[in-house]
């Protein structure tokens, strides 16, 4: 949880890439990646897995960026209004669940 904490709100509340997407890509890197830049086979495999994940997530949710997924930009809000707060609690668990399901289907 501590490692992924700054992913919220689209990478540090910037509204950019959804934290569930970023976290999933980190898991793909842990499972399929390599620390050897010369290992072309492993690099090709990890990038292909990443592309498959991103394609499926986008297929389910039509976007990868937090502000697009949420329908508003978390970063520009001084105070999240109650209806927007409700959106976060309704939508974010779905995106996390989708990411987990996609990852599970990849193994």
Image (cartoon, grey):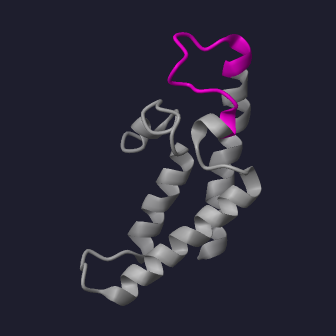
The part of the image, by quadrant, that contains residue 88 is: top right
| Residue shown at the point (51%, 40%) measured from the top left | 16
Quadrant containing the C terminus in the rendered view: bottom right
Position in image of residue 84 (x %, y %):
69, 20
- Which image quarter is the N terminus in? top left
User: With respect to residue 58, does 30 lie above or below?
Assistant: below
Where residue 22 appears, as percent x and y from the top left, is 48, 52
- Main SS of the magenta part reads loop
State whether residue 16 is above or below residue 75.
below
Q: Is residue 26 magenta?
A: no
41 relative position to 76: left or right: left
**Whole-percent x, y for residue 8 in the image:** 49, 35
| Range of residues picked out in magenta | 69-85
Residue, x 48% and y 53% (percent of image)? 23
**Pick the front one: 19 or 72:** 72
User: Is 50 left or right of 88, judged from the image as shown?
Assistant: left
In the image, farthest residue toward the bottom: 41
Residue at x 70%, y 31% (from the top left corner): 71
- Residue 8, placed above or below residue 46: above
């Amino acid at each position: 949880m501590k490692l992924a904490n700054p992913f919220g709100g689209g990478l540090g509340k910037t509204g950019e890439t959804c934290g569930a997407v970023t976290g999933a890509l980190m898991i793909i890197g842990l499972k399929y990646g390599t620390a050897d830049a010369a290992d072309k086979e492993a690099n090709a495999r990890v990038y292909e897995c990443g592309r498959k994940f991103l394609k499926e997530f986008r297929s389910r949710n039509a976007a990868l960026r937090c502000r697009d997924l949420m329908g508003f930009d978390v970063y520009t809000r001084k105070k999240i209004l109650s209806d927007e707060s409700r959106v976060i609690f309704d939508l974010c668990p779905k995106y996390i669940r989708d990411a987990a399901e996609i990852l599970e289907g990849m193994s």
